[in-house]
Amino acid sequence: MKNNPIEVKPVAFVHNERVAPEDDDWDAVVSTIELAEDIPTEALAGIEEFSHLEIIYHFHLVDKNKAVARSRHPRNNKDWPVVGSFAQRNKSRPNLLGITTVELISKEGRTLKVKKLDAINGTPILDIKPVMKEFLPQTPISQPKWSTELMKGYWNNKH
């Protein structure tokens, strides 16, 4: 199978107060997502009927040379096991892609106001999808203890 290049361009951009990547306290961040100039406003028609959205974005400030598939201790914490890139959600990933489920606060014209988007100011958004119950896991979710520990302060200001 031939590896043809995949070309994507931003459909929107993030606007918020976070200017540098940080690991925790994302629940305090409210972001505005503004459509790119070449995306028509009508692309957002009906989106306000959904409570949550999936935002796919590009880690645009990560050094491409550090974006590789590898294994390491999450957050370099030696108390946690060495796991591969695809068993973590860190930003130094082969394609520099992030995905987060956000709460939609409002839609106004070409902008969406959202909560819990863990992307910094200026982040290019590659896609916006509504969350539908039917696409959520239909079976119980399981995860290792270290990942629950890692996420303690990510959303809820408690470390």
Image (cartoon, grey):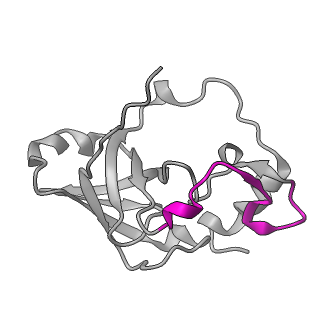
Give the mark count: 0
Along the line of sight, the residue nearer the viewer: 60 or 88: 60
Q: Check if residue 69 falls in the magenta segment.
A: yes
Q: Is residue 37 left or right of residue 77?
A: left
Q: Which span is picked out in magenta?
A: 62-81
Picture residue at 70% right of the left edge, 50% below the top? 70
Q: Residue at x 76, y 37 (%)?
A: 142
Horizontal arrangement in the rendering, residue 72 relative to residue 101 (left or right) = right
Residue 63 is a magenta residue: yes
The percent coordinates of residue 108 (x first, y second) are 16, 58
In percent of width and height, residue 52 lies at: 40, 45
Q: Indicate the quadrant where residue 115 lies.
A: bottom left
Q: Position of residue 137 (x, y in %)?
A: 59, 29
Residue beneath the point at 13% across and 48% down: 39
Check the image and name the residue furthest to the top: 1
Left or right of 80? Residue 98 is left
Which residue occupies the foreground of this view, 123 or 84? 84
Query: In the image, residue 51 lies at what x, y percent?
Result: 38, 45
Residue 48 as seen in the image, left or right of residue 81: left
| Closer to us: 112 or 100 | 100
- Residue 48 against residue 23 in the figure, above or below: above
Q: Is residue 114 above or below residue 23?
A: above
Residue at x-position 41% and y-position 56%: 58
